[in-house]
Image: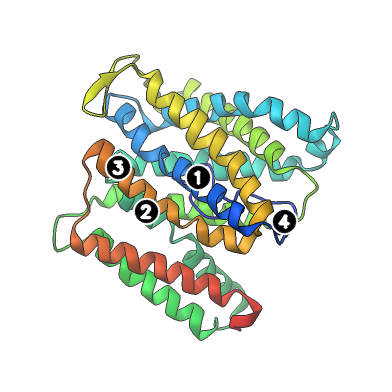
């Protein structure tokens, strides 16, 4: 499991119902990389819509609603006609839909509207560091030294990613990105709960709940909604609005999620969580090719430190590292 929820619904590994150690890690790595690549396309392809006048609320609503409809048949097959599990896990579905889908994606898209895609995603990837801090406050137990080292490295990387000396950082965009990190951290907590609910069913139902919540917020005027059906700038030309939206829905959500689950089954959650870190690299490359967003050398160095810090935090979570 990564993070991304995203710049994404979630990380390429997705929420899992059991800790599985795959017996085909080679195939799993390839499928996991494909999933990370698909998830990495979310921010770069939604940004043209935002620049054309779409609000983050409208973009997240369209993504959640359309993705829920696409995944609904797959979820129905996974449930095998048993909807009792959905009723039993309504709290998990509600929390997943409101926090992991609506909250996290809304904050990420709002951040992407104000800052480069790669920077927003790197800030969101600080979620494991935030969880370490939360656990420290709750238990009053000092984390292992490797965990603390990873946190320090990631925070130093964040400072370089924001690059306050190179350009005036967008503080509102940074706050939105940190909000996405908080939402992603909540996703980690929710997905760690034991459940019999199939992952695809949780994703489809959570997307549906998120879409309903966002739609209701838009109807009452709490959440600004604007979605002009105009041509948008894409790959040096123009394309209808539904082209980038289709990529986000079909590739960066539906395909990315299903392939992420398949990859996790083949290589296990732990390896999948590290393979999923490649989403940051893919997002930066796609944003460079699609939007011309090129990070500075300082920001690139900061990105390396953020990823390295997250890797150290995750390594510290294994029994071998304690």
Q: Decide which of tag 3 and tag 4 comes sooner along the chain.
A: 4
Instruction: Point out which mark residue 281 bears.
Output: 2
Which residue is label 3 attached to? 287
Tell me the SS state at disc 3: helix
Which residue is label 1 attached to? 34
Within-10-Å neighbours for mark 3: few <14, some 14–19, many 20+: many
Label 1 and label 4: CA atoms lie apart by: 27 Å
**Residue found at x 54% / y 46%:** 10
Q: Position of residue 170 (x, y in %)?
A: 23, 50
Quadrant of image for the N terminus: bottom right
* Residue at the far top in the pictured view: 229
The answer to the question of whether label 2 and label 3 lie on touching residues, with beta carbons closer than 8 A, is no
Q: Please tell me whether mark 1 or mark 4 is closer to you in this view.
A: 1
Q: Please tell me whether mark 1 or mark 3 is closer to you in this view.
A: 1
Label 2 and label 4: CA atoms lie apart by: 29 Å
Tell me the SS state at disc 1: helix
Which residue is label 4 attached to? 193
């Amino acid at each position: 499991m990564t993070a991304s929820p995203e710049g994404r619904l979630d990380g390429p590994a997705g929420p899992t119902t059991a800790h599985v150690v795959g017996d085909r890690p080679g195939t799993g790595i390839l499928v996991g990389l494909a999933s990370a690549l698909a998830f990495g396309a979310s921010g770069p392809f939604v940004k043209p819509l935002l620049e054309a006048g779409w609000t983050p609320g409208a973009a997240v609503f369209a993504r959640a609603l359309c993705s829920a409809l696409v995944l609904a048949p797959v979820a129905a097959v996974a449930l095998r006609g048993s909807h009792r599990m959905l009723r039993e896990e309504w709290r998990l579905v509600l929390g997943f839909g409101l926090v992991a889908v609506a909250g996290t994606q809304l904050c990420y898209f709002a951040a992407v509207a104000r800052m480069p895609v790669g920077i927003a995603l790197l800030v969101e990837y600080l979620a494991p560091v935030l969880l370490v801090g939360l656990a420290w406050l709750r238990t009053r137990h000092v984390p292992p030294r490797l965990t603390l080292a990873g946190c320090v490295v990631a925070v130093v990387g964040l400072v370089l990613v924001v690059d306050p000396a190179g350009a005036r950082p967008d503080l509102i965009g940074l706050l939105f990105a940190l909000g996405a990190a908080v939402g992603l951290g909540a996703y980690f907590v929710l997905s760690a709960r034991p459940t019999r609910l199939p992952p695809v069913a949780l994703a489809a139902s959570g997307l549906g709940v998120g879409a309903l919540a966002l739609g209701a917020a838009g109807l009452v005027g709490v959440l600004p909604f604007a979605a002009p059906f105009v041509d948008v700038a894409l790959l040096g030309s123009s394309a209808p609005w539904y082209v980038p939206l289709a990529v986000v829905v079909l590739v960066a959500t539906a395909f990315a999620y299903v392939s992420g689950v398949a990859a996790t089954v083949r290589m296990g959650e732990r390896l999948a969580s590290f393979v999923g870190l490649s989403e940051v690299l893919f997002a930066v490359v796609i944003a460079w090719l699609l939007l011309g967003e090129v990070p500075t050398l300082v920001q690139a160095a900061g990105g390396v430190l953020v990823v390295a810090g997250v890797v150290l935090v995750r390594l510290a979570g294994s029994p071998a590292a304690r």
